[in-house]
Amino acid sequence: MVLNPYRSVRLEGIRLFESRPGWVAMELPPEDEWSEQLQQLTAEQQERVSSPDFCEQLRTVLGRKFLRLCPT
């Protein structure tokens, strides 16, 4: 979920899986699936969401949560 001054915007369709023990892989949907949601973001937020740094941060944060929730 991305927050902006007007609303929260859900970016759905992110898929996480454990490719091997302790290694989390992330798949994002094609960018056109998010086009409607991205239009609701500010220009700065749209640029950030498109950056490799955002994807890496997303993978790190979601990967940690995923591993905490998965049974070992």
Image (spheres, rainbow, N blue to C red):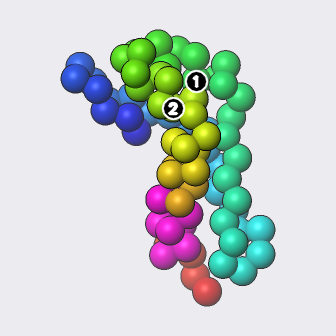
Residue 22 x/y as whole percent: 66, 78
* Disc 2 secondary structure class: helix
Residue 4 or 68: which is nearer the viewer?
A: 4
Instruction: Give amino acid for label 1.
Output: Trp
Looking at the picture, does residue 70 appear above or below residue 65? below
Q: Which residue is mark 2?
A: 49
Secondary structure mainly formed by the magenta segment:
helix
Residue at point 47% right, 66% down?
Answer: 65
Q: CA distance from mark 1 to mark 2?
A: 11 Å
Looking at the picture, does residue 10 appear above or below residue 26? above
Taking the view exactly as shown, the residue that stands out farthest to the right is 20
Q: Are marks 1 and 2 in contact (CB under 8 Å)?
A: yes
* Disc 1 secondary structure class: helix
Relative to 42, 19 lies left or right: right
Residue 28 x/y as whole percent: 67, 40
Q: Which residue is mark 1?
A: 34
Instruction: Give amino acid for label 2.
Output: Val
Relative to 40, 17 lies left or right: right
Relative to 40, 5 lies left or right: left
Category of crowding for the residue at label 1, using alpha-carbon neighbours closer than 10 angstroms: few (below 14), some (14–19), many (at least 20)? some
Boundaries of the magenta span: 61-68
Please identify the quadrant where the N terminus is shown. Answer: top left
Residue 59 x/y as whole percent: 57, 55
Please identify the quadrant where the C terminus is shown. Answer: bottom right
Asked if the magenta segment contains residue 63, the reply would be yes
Residue 15 or 57: which is nearer the viewer?
A: 57
Q: How many marks?
A: 2
Category of crowding for the residue at label 2, using alpha-carbon neighbours closer than 10 angstroms: few (below 14), some (14–19), many (at least 20)? some
Looking at the picture, does residue 14 appear above or below residue 22? above
Residue 40 x/y as whole percent: 40, 16
